[in-house]
Image (cartoon, grey):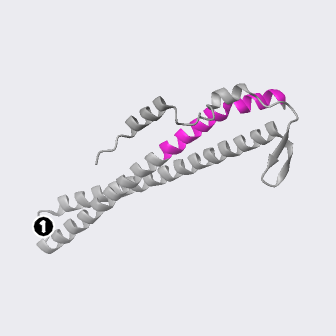
Amino acid sequence: EYFDVLAEDEEEEEEGDRPPAFGAWERRAENSVPRNVGAWGPDGAVEGSVLAQQLRDATLQIEDARSLARKRASILTECEERLDISAATTDGQRRKLAERTEWITATESARLRRRIRALEFDEYSARSLVQVARNKLGAAERRLQELERRYGPILSAGAGRE
């Protein structure tokens, strides 16, 4: 059965059954927290003001996202190095086979060809890992940009007050 998600969303909006959204970050940023308003958490009062708590939370999330992006970048670099090594090894074996073609035995030629196929598979696997690492790095960078965009008003409001 065909399920059209967009059609249902449009119907819900027309009917007005959906509760109103809490509001975008941009709209909430306009309603900045007054100075010295106490912060509350699950265990009761939290030391400091609400703005200070928001600043700590925003800074922590952004730093975690930066750390993840740096980690993913180093993983990508490592994968690219492995790919370079694998490609160089495969090319070396191909050259070795090409140089020996005229005087090599059939058994050794078959052994070198099997070795080259295995190296080509390793190179293919390394290329796949590089692509996965690039995708994960891109996702981490997009997440960091989203957090910086989302928390930009809070950080700028906090910088002006604190």
**Looking at the picture, how far across and down is residue 19, in whole percent?**
58, 36
For residue 99, side relative to residue 126 (left or right): left
- Secondary structure, magenta segment, majority class: helix
Range shown magenta: 137-161
**Looking at the picture, how far across and down is residue 43, in whole percent?**
81, 55
- Judging by the rendered image, the residue that carries numbered circle 1 is 103
Vertical position of residue 157 compared to residue 67: above or below: above
Identify residue type, mark 1: Trp
For residue 15, side relative to residue 113 (left or right): right
Q: Nearer the viewer, residue 132 or 154?
A: 154
Asked whether 152 falls inside the magenta stretch, the response is: yes
- Dot 1 alpha-carbon crowd within 10 angstroms: few under 14, some 14 to 19, many 20 or more: few
Hey, which quadrant is residue 48 in on the image?
A: top right
Q: Nearer the viewer, residue 25 or 152?
A: 25
For residue 94, side relative to residue 81 (left or right): left
> Residue at (64%, 27%) from the top-left corner?
26
**Looking at the picture, how far across and down is residue 10, in whole percent?**
43, 32
Residue lying furthest bottom in this view?
A: 107
Vertical position of residue 39 compared to residue 101: above or below: above
- Does dot 1 land on a helix, a strand or a loop? loop
> Residue at (50%, 46%) from the top-left corner?
137
Q: Quadrant of the C terminus?
A: top right
**Looking at the picture, how far across and down is residue 50, in whole percent?**
81, 39
